[in-house]
Image (spheres, rainbow, N blue to C red):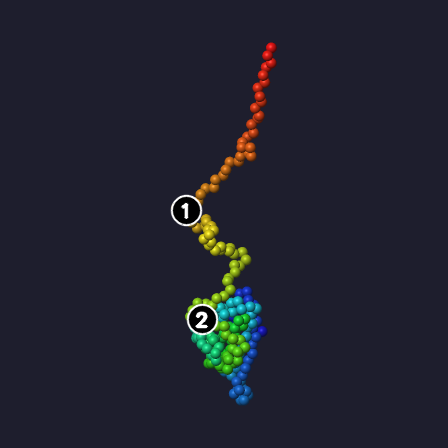
Amino acid sequence: MLDVEVWIDGNKGEAFSASYITNEAEKRGRIEDKDLVNVTVTRYEKPDGVVRETVKLVRRLAQEKGYQVDEKKIEGVRALTITGPAEAWVMWPSTKYVIKVGGQGRTSVPPSMVESYGDRFPSKLPGGSLEGPLPAGPESKPKKGEAVEEKYDPANPKANLDNYDPDKVKIPAKQVEPTVDPEGSSDPKPDKKPDKKKPKK
């Protein structure tokens, strides 16, 4: 297992590799860098973000000095080609996988190797991925402790008291109603006693 080159937040990956040598190198009994083709297959727990992060990685490489990247179809496999100082690679996403074929000391990648792995891992790379908007990815979830911004609901708008112009918006003062006894008086009054009549003599 190798370090994961395409890192996806919240989607764990495991990378596995294999190496192949050319028939010519096998015949002469001596192997050089240009005779080796390395293949790395990274398997993720789920497809979320696989296409998006693969394209982001290759776009970053395109901004680095010495790397040339392109998008093309190789033996029917839509892939991203990466050519750097004394190295050449072909890379593409496939559902829950990222495949990378190539090696150091090479100027090209054998199309037959791309075709072989493309049959087992069909490319999900959209056309124009290097120039157009980034492919869709999972919605970023707020980290623990971060405030969640509520979406505006026109049917039930809420006032934003942190950002408002007091010269344009007047917040009504809260009115407090006086406390009233259930019987309608806050202070109980004594009952009025009837006048007593004096007996006549």
Q: Earlier in the sequence, mark 1 or mark 2?
A: 2
Looking at the rendered structure, the kind of residue marked 2 is Ser
> Which residue extends farthest bottom?
28
Q: Is residue 105 visible?
A: no
For the N terminus, which image quadrant?
Answer: bottom right
Which residue corresponds to mark 1?
Answer: 169
> Which residue extends farthest top?
201
Which residue corresponds to mark 2?
Answer: 129
Q: Position of residue 22 (x, y in %)?
A: 52, 85
In this view, 180 is above or below 114: above
> Which residue extends farthest left?
167
**Residue at position x 54%, y 31% in the image:** 185
In this view, 175 is above or below 66: above
| Residue 10: quarter of image | bottom right
Classify mark 2: helix, strand or loop: loop
Left or right, residue 120 beside residue 159: right
Compute the Cα span from label 1 to label 2: 46 Å
Q: Residues within 10 Å of mark 2 (few under 14, many from 20)?
A: some
Classify mark 1: helix, strand or loop: loop
Q: Position of residue 131 (x, y in %)?
A: 42, 70
Q: Nearer the viewer, residue 44 or 188?
A: 188
